[in-house]
Amino acid sequence: QSALTQPRSVSGSPGQSVTISCTGTSSDVGTYNSVSWYQQYPGKAPRLMIYGVSKRPSGVPDRFSGSKSGNTASLTISGLQAEDEADYYCCSYADSYTRFGGGTKLTVL
Amino acid sequence: QVQLQESGPGLVKPSEALSLTCTVSGGSMSDKYWSWIRQPPGKGLEWIGYVYYSGFANYNPSLKSRVTISVDTSKNQFSLRLDSMTAADTAVYYCASDDYGNYPHWGQGTLVSVSS
C-alpha cells in the first residue's frame, strides 16, 4: 500500500497563499470524506489542522482550509505567516485502515 | 483535555519484540478508538493500527503479521507489541486518540532504536 502523494516541498512569502496537494486513488481519497491534515514542527508531535476534508478543530486559524476533488485533496494556507513553516501530512481512510502522505515541507521565504 | 504518554524501552535488539504502553489521562477510554503511529527518522508517518475500548483491534496490512495492540481500560492504558524487530523498525512511535481515522490528540512520541 503506497503512501498518498504529496509534493516534497512548497514555499511562499508572508501574506501569500499556498496550496499543498495530496493525491490518492479511488480506494481512499476518491471514495471517503475522511481526509485530514497535520502540521508538524521538528521534534514535535503532529497537530490536527483539518478533518473531514474541510473541517477545522477548535483553535486552528481560519487561514487553514481544506478541499477535495476526485482523488486529490488540498490544503490551502492563506495569509502565510512565519510560524506556518513546518511539515504537513495528509491522511485518508482507506478500506478499514488509514494511509498517510509522504509529507510536504513548507518554507516561508 | 485528553493527554497521552508513551513509555517503554528506547533500544531493542534485532529479532526481539518491542513493547510500548500509552497512558491516557484527562478523559475516558470508553467508546473510543486508540491508535499507534510511527515515523522513521527523517521520514513520513505510518499508521500501525488501532484498538477499540472493547479490545477489538485492526492493523496496517503491511505490519499485521507482527503487530498486537491491546487495551486495559482499568488502567487507562493501551499497548503495542511488535515482533521480530529490524533496523527498518527504528522510529519515533506515537500513540494517539483515533476519531474515525482522525487523530486529534497525540503523545509526545518515543524514539525506539533497533541495534545490537
Image: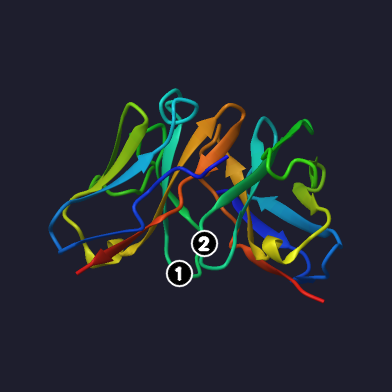
Q: Is residue B84 above or below residue A55?
A: below
Disc 1 to disc 2: CB gap under 8 Å: no
- The x and y percentages for residue A87 are 39, 60
Pointer 2 chain: B
Which disc number belongs to residue B43? 2
| Side (left or right) of A91 relative to B98 | left
| Side (left or right) of A16 relative to A47 | left
Instruction: Confirm whether residue B36 shows in the render.
Output: yes
Q: Nearer the viewer, mark 1 or mark 2?
A: 2
Q: Residue at x 41, y 32 (%)?
A: A52
- The x and y percentages for residue A34 are 46, 30
Which disc number belongs to residue A18? none
Disc 1 target residue: A42
| Side (left or right) of B50 relative to A44 | right
Disc 1 is placed on an element classified as loop
Q: Is residue B112 above or below residue A18?
A: below
Residue at the front extreme of this rendering: A2
